[in-house]
Image (cartoon, rainbow, N blue to C red):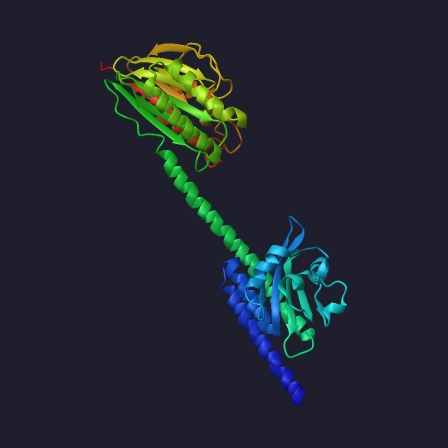
Amino acid sequence: MARNTTSEISLSKRLKNLVKANQSLAHIESLNELLPQLLDLAQEVTGAEASSILLYNPTADLLEFALAKNEALGEETEQILKSNVELKMGEGLAGWVAANREPIIIKDVQRDNRFFKGADHYTGFHTRTLLCVPIVYGDELLGVIEVLNSKGRSSFDREDEEILGSFAQLAGVAIIRSRLLETQLKQQRLQIELEAASQIQAQFCPQCPDLAGDSNAWAVSLPAAFVGGDLYDLIQMADGSWLTYVADVCGKGLPAALIMVALWARIRSEAIVNRKIDVVMESVNSAMYSLLAKEGFFATIVMGRYWPTTGRMQLIRGGHLFPLWCVGRGLAELPSLRGIPLGVIPKPHYETREITLEPGQSILFITDGVTEARNGEDEFFGSHRLPKYLKAAKGPPWGSQLLEEVLAWRGDAEATDDLTILEIWREPQGP
C-alpha cells in the first residue's frame, strides 16, 4: 500500500507540473521566450539532469539544436551544441525519433549503436540514460524533446514517457501559436512600414499650385498597393512657365516606388539647368538608362511645358499614353509625338510638338490605371469610353469627374494598377 501511495503522490505531482506547464506556455508569445521555459518544465516534470530541444528544419531536412539546459555544465552548453551539432533525419537517437515519430527510452545509451556521441564530445557531458519524444502538430513534425539522466533513478520509465509525451503535445501547440503570433507581428510591422512609405511617397506628388491668368491645375495619384510607380509633378521655371509631367514606372510596389523617387529627383535636377524639354528628357533618359537597363525596368512619361498666361504648351512623350486634349464636349487630335520609354536605349530621339489651350479647354495626362481599370466582370474601362464620357460630362475641369467615373466602373473590384490623372485647364470666357 505504501508503494502505491508513493506512486500516486508522484503521479499527482507530475500532473500538477503538467497543468503548470500548460498554464505557463499559454501565456508565452515569442519562440525565444518559449524554449527556455519549455525545457525548464521538461526537466521538472521528468526529474532530469539535462534537456534539449531540436527543431526540425524542413528546408534542410535537419534537426538543429535550438536550446539546451544542463545543470552541471551551465549556459555555454547551448552555444556549443548550436555551433557544432546538427542531425540528419535518422541520425542519432533524436534523429531516429524524428524519422519514426515514436518516443524512445534508452537505459544505457553507451550500449546503443544509434547513440550520437558528438554532443557529449563537444560539451564534456556524460549521457547515461535518455528519453526522447517527437513534437508533432497534426501531420507536421516540429522537432524533438529529449531529457537526459534521470535523477535518483536508474532510468526513465513509461510514466515519464507518457508525461513527456503529453508535454510535447502542449509544446507543439505553443510552438505553432508562437509562430502564428510572430507572423502576425511581422505583418503588423510590415503594415506600419508600408503605411509610412505611403505617407513619404505622397510627398513626391505635390499639391497643385495656383497658376497665373485663367489657368488651373488638379491632380490625383492612387497606388494599387501601399506604394506604387506612378508619378506627377509641376515644376516652376524661371520664366513663369511650368514643367509638368506624368510618369509610370513598370511594375508596382516597393521596387517601382524606389525607381519613382529616383526619377522624381532626376527630373527636378535637370529642370533647374535645362530650359528645353527635349534636353531634359534626353538627360533624364541617360541617367535612368544606367540605373534601369541592367534590371529590365523602364518608365513611360509624357511631359509638357506650359505658359499659363497664354495657354501655350510644348509636349514631349516617351512611350506613354497620349494626353487627352478636351475641347468642348469632345477630344481634339494631338500632333504626332514619337519617343520610347525612359531607360530602354542610351540615346533615343524625342519629338517636341506645341499646342495652345484656349479658354474653356483642358489637357489631361493619365496613366493606364485609368484605361485598364477592371470591373467585377474583369472588363477594362478602356480608351473607347473616354470620348463617350466627355460628351456626357460638364467641364472644364474634367479630371475629378473622370476619376469618379473610373472608380464607379471598378466598383468593389481590386485595383490592379496605379492610377494618376493630372489636368491643366483654362477657365471659359464669360458671355
> Which image quadrant: the N terminus?
bottom right
- Of residue 124 and residue 287, the one placed in the foreground of this image is 124
Q: Is residue 381 visible?
A: no
Residue placed most toward the observer, 1 or 151:
151
User: Percent from the top left, x then y, of residue 31?
Assistant: 53, 58
Of the 4 image quadrants, the one containing the C terminus is: top left
Q: Is residue 8 above or below residue 371?
A: below
Q: Quadrant of residue 161?
A: bottom right
Q: Position of residue 221 (x, y in %)?
A: 39, 30
| Residue 35 lies in quadrant | bottom right
Q: Up-down: is 72 above or below 427? A: below
Q: Position of residue 316 (x, y in %)?
A: 41, 15
Tell me if 284 is positioned left or right of 63 in this view.
Answer: left
* Left or right: 416, with 208 as reference point: right
Q: Residue at x 50, y 26 (%)?
A: 292
Query: Nearest the camera: 130 or 281?
Result: 130
Q: Residue furthest bottom?
A: 1
Identified at 43% across, 41% down, the residue is 194
Toward the viewer: 385 or 258?
258
Q: Position of residue 227 (x, y in %)?
A: 43, 35
Q: Is residue 402 left or right of residue 98?
A: left
